[in-house]
Image (tube, rainbow, N blue to C red):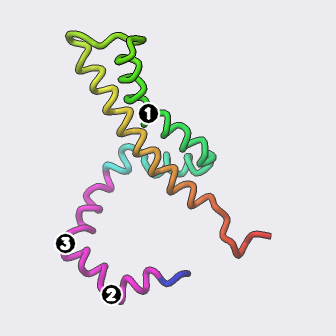
Amino acid sequence: ESGLLSAAEEAGVFSKLESAGAFSTAEKLLPLVEKFKLLSLFEELLEVEAGLLFTAANFLIVFTPVVLTLQICGFVPFPQGPVIPVEALACLSTGAAGFALFATAFIIGNLQEEPASFQQ
């Protein structure tokens, strides 16, 4: 409705993307999207309030700094031995999941907003 796709087509954005191989790369990734059921998960997340998703994302993002702060203050012991890689993996994975969920919550929040023309 805003004419964004028409303007992109006139500017030759799509032909530049095709020459760079972006569409073929996206096509190769479609089986992975289907295997992990990402589209159905995203559709289910559309029913969840975006604020709740932001809250969960923020919790995951601050998990690592909170654990490190508690360790520095002495409330939680530092890992030793074979537990170090486990804690590092947990901290990295919660951070990555948090940032991915934050981006998803942002998109869902924009999709959940009512357009101004339909508000009463």
For residue 62, side relative to residue 12 (left or right): right
Q: Is residue 73 magenta?
A: no
Identify the residue under disc 2: 11
Q: In the rendered view of the protein, which quadrant contains the N terminus?
A: bottom right
Farthest residue to the bottom: give it.
Answer: 10
Which of pointers 1 and 2 lies earlier in the amino acid sequence? 2
Q: Is residue 107 above or below residue 44?
A: below
- Mark whose residue sits in front, 1 or 3: 1
Identify the residue under disc 1: 62
Give the percent coordinates (x, y) of residue 68.
36, 23
How many neighbours does mark 1 have within 10 angstroms: few (below 14), some (14-19), or many (20 or more)?
Answer: some
Identify the residue under disc 3: 20
Is the residue under label 3 in contact with that under label 1 (CB below 8 Å)? no
State the SS at label 2: loop
Which residue is located at x 46 percent, y 80 percent? 4
Secondary structure of the magenta portion, mostly? Answer: helix
For residue 50, side relative to residue 13 (left or right): right
Which residue is located at x 43 percent, y 48 percent? 38
Q: Is residue 41 above or below residue 86?
A: below
Q: In whole angstroms, how far apart are the C-alphas of marks 1 and 3?
A: 37 Å
Q: Look at label 2 and name its amino acid.
A: Ala
Which of pointers 1 and 3 lies earlier in the amino acid sequence? 3
Which of pointers 2 and 3 lies earlier in the amino acid sequence? 2
Span highlighted in magenta in the image: 4-31
Q: Look at label 3 and name its amino acid.
A: Ala
**In this view of the protein, which residue sits in the foreground, 94 or 45?**
94
Give the percent coordinates (x, y) of residue 33.
36, 50
